[in-house]
Image: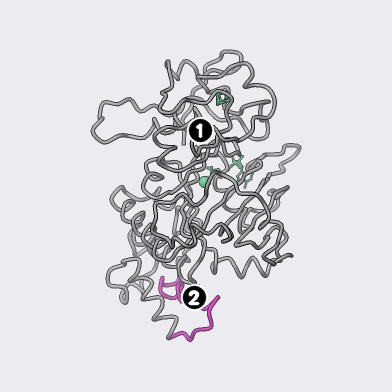
């Protein structure tokens, strides 16, 4: 394994527009200094599941870049490959049937592609940590939350139990768990969903990570708690200059936390750019349709259609654009050949032959446009 600063991952070209387009908050010197390695640089990631004779291309040539203190939102419907992409970074894809068939993963200039298991274990829970949708999946039901945080700390730092105990309490205070000393003794099921997610965030912060991978961390929470957890994560990454990969199917959540967005469809990034630009004037019809699914304050009468139709199965991807069967702008050239992710306008890159103009709406009834190539209507639900 190559751990040098001149590793292949470090030499790879940037992707996804200017990774440093942030909302501020993190150190400007890091954000402005091109010589600083991105915290995460994923290039051409191909993660597949080989089942029988079928090959499911869950991540099909994915590029992602996140710089220190930056939050990248990875958005897409259920099954688009977000979690598999995230799990591939730290070797968490179950194998078999999962295989990383290609690409590179760079962490601060270090090429992790061929890293030893020992090195990956050292990074996992240390410099790179995860927060999942369901905290019960990561918390042991039979140990107190305090003991679990202490164990997470001591796995990576040589602190006495007493010192680790004090640090665990500080972490619970930091993530605003009320009455932290008391709560240290609680079992996970004795806490509310919101408090449990705060405990998982405290565990994720236990070893001062440089990258947090948060996979739908607020999806199971009610709206008020969701807003609190988002504020908390946002504040922490700004204070600590932590890079965050934030996965969600919800553009409303993205607008709250992400500096940049990468939209994923059928295993590929189909559009990427700064959050404000993506939200107000996306180039890709799929992004436009996802944004149109988000409720808007003050527009209670607005029709909120899910994106009609279903994505193609990733073991039988069609030629050309994978979105063609659902796209109101589809033309015959969309169904031929490889469609590259390329710069469209401003800082946006999109994988589309007939992108939207700035601010252009999708015309017509997208539900009737969402037909298969032989004209059969498709019905389904997004996310
Ligand atoms: N354990 C698995 N075995 C086989 N295929 C899988 C497995 N996990 C994921 N996949 C495949 O990868 C695709 C992407 O899954 P996932 O990354 O979980 O989607 P998302 O997080 O965007 O909802 C799925 O549609 C499925 O085809
Ligand atoms: S390439 Fe064609 S089918 Fe695909 S999103 Fe663009 S216009 Fe629609
Ligand atoms: Mg997922």
Q: Circle 1 is placed at which residue position?
A: 345
**Depth check: 142 or 77 in front?**
77
Give residue 93's position: percent from left, percent from top: 63, 53
Q: Is residue 14 above or below residue 324?
A: below
User: Viewer-nearest of labels 1 and 2?
Assistant: 1
Q: Is residue 53 above or below residue 122?
A: above
The image quarter containing residue 177 is bottom left
Magenta segment, principal secondary structure? helix
Badge 1 vs badge 2, beta-carbon distance below 8 Å: no
Please, what secondary structure does the residue beneath circle 1 have? Answer: loop
**Depth check: 102 or 58 in front?**
102
**Depth check: 237 or 380 in front?**
237
Please, what secondary structure does the residue beneath circle 2 have? Answer: helix
Give residue 105's position: percent from left, percent from top: 65, 55
Q: Circle 2 is placed at which residue position?
A: 153
Query: Which stretch appears magenta?
Result: 143-162
């Amino acid at each position: 394994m190559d751990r040098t600063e001149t590793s292949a991952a470090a030499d790879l070209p940037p992707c996804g527009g200017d990774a440093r387009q942030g909302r501020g908050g993190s150190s400007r010197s890091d954000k402005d200094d091109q010589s600083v390695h991105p915290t995460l640089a994923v290039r051409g990631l191909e993660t597949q599941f080989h089942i029988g004779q079928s090959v499911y291309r869950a991540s099909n040539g994915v590029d992602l870049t996140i710089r220190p203190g930056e939050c990248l939102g990875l958005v897409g419907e259920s099954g688009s490959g977000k979690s598999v992409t995230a799990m591939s970074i730290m070797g968490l894809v179950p194998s078999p049937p999962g295989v990383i068939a290609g690409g590179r993963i760079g962490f601060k200039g270090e090429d992790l592609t061929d890293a030893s298991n020992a090195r990956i274990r050292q990074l996992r829970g240390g410099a790179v940590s995860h927060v999942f949708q369901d905290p019960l999946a990561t918390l042991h039901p039979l140990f107190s939350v305090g003991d679990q945080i202490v164990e997470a700390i001591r796995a990576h730092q040589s602190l006495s139990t007493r010192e680790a105990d004090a640090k665990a309490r500080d972490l619970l205070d930091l993530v605003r768990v009320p009455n932290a000393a008391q709560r240290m003794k609680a079992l996970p099921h004795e806490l509310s969903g919101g408090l449990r997610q705060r405990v998982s965030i405290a565990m994720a912060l236990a070893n001062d990570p440089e990258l947090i991978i948060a996979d739908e961390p607020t999806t199971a929470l009610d709206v008020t708690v969701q807003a609190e957890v988002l504020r908390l994560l946002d504040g922490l990454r700004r204070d600590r200059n932590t890079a965050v990969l934030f996965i969600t199917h919800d553009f409303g959540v993205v607008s709250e936390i992400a500096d940049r967005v990468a939209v994923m469809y059928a295993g590929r990034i189909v559009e990427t750019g700064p959050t404000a630009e993506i939200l107000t004037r996306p180039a890709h019809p799929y992004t436009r349709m996802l944004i149109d699914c988000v409720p808007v304050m003050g527009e209670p009468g607005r029709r909120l259609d899910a994106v009609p139709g279903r994505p193609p199965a990733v073991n039988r991807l069609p030629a050309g654009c994978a979105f063609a069967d659902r796209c109101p702008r589809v033309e015959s050239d969309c169904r031929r050949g490889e469609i590259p992710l390329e710069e469209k306008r401003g800082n946006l890159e999109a994988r589309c032959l007939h992108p939207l103009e700035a601010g252009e709406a999708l015309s017509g009834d997208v539900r009737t446009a969402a037909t298969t190539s032989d004209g059969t209507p498709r019905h389904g639900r997004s996310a």
